[in-house]
Image (tube, rainbow, N blue to C red):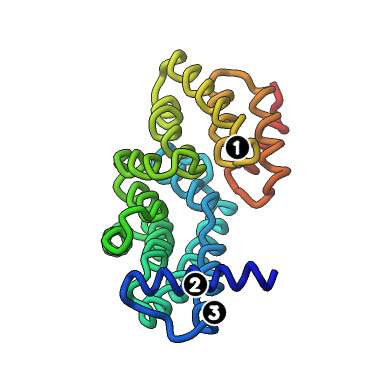
Amino acid sequence: MKIINTLITALIIFSALITGTPLKSETSGETAYFSLEKARSLTSSKTLGFIFQQSISESLTSGENNTIFNEKASKNAMQSINILSELIQKYPGISDFYSARAVAYALLPSITDAETGRKIRGKCLDDGRKALEINPENIEAYIALFFVDDDRTYLERALQIDPENETANVYMCTSKYAFPALKGNSRNLTTEAIKELESLSDRYPDNIFILFLKGRLYLKNGNRQMAYKIFKKAYQLDPEQPAVTILLDALEKDPA
């Protein structure tokens, strides 16, 4: 563990040096790294995914459970923003700090009023662009920018850099297939989207967002038994996602 921490600290210090903002010491470098990881842990990709779902497709999660989830997501995002703002003030030349804060900002617009949401969206865009100005290969920044702009070219760039990136692959499939199928009335489109999600699920079997979307599409196609099985697996992986809980409860009450 000590060797790993030393390597991590060295990477941070190297990153800071090449961006022209050296950290003061190995101790400060290690502290900065763990602060970054704490901030990221508060804004996980699965939380981002469910907020993404709520913001684009029709809401199935209105009510008390969803309110609690959104309040928790908002609180976590603000904690993350505070941590990252302190890091940026101390070390303003490190791309990862800006991209992580962009992700945290991206969680907020859909869970606040419209005017505040526009301001927060602007902050997310500013941070994402600043992160890419420092490091044009920062995948996290491209994902944050996609989230607020809904422009797949950001994901295409991310996948050019890392074709195996899970989050970029999931959002690309979601944007191209799952959401159009959920919002439309074409059975063929729904079937195609299920096929694409099944393929993606083979690569990332424990990705709850994929399971959630796949379950919704099976439900839309009338296959309630398969939808129930998928939601059950998603719930077992994480029982705190309100959309999964609500749909699972509905199927248990009316399995027919």
First reached walking from the N terminus: tag 3 or tag 2: 3
Residue found 69% across the figure and 22% down from its top: 225
Cα–Cα span, label 3 and label 1: 32 Å
* Kind of residue at disc 3: Thr
First reached walking from the N terminus: tag 3 or tag 1: 3
First reached walking from the N terminus: tag 2 or tag 1: 2
| Residue 150, percent from left and from top | 32, 43
Residue found 39% across the figure and 23% down from its top: 184
Badge 1 crowding class, 10 Å Cα cut-off, few under 14, some 14 to 19, many 20 or more, is: some
Is residue 31 shown above or below 75?
Answer: below
* Kind of residue at disc 1: Tyr
Asked whether the viewer can see residue 117, the reply is no
Give the labeled residue for mark 3: 31
- SS at badge 3: helix
The mark found on residue 204 in the picture is 1
Give the labeled residue for mark 2: 79
- The N terminus lies in which quarter of the figure? bottom right
Is residue 87 shown above or below 237?
Answer: below
Badge 2 crowding class, 10 Å Cα cut-off, few under 14, some 14 to 19, many 20 or more, is: some
| Residue 22, percent from left and from top | 38, 79
Q: Nearer the viewer, mark 3 or mark 2?
A: 3
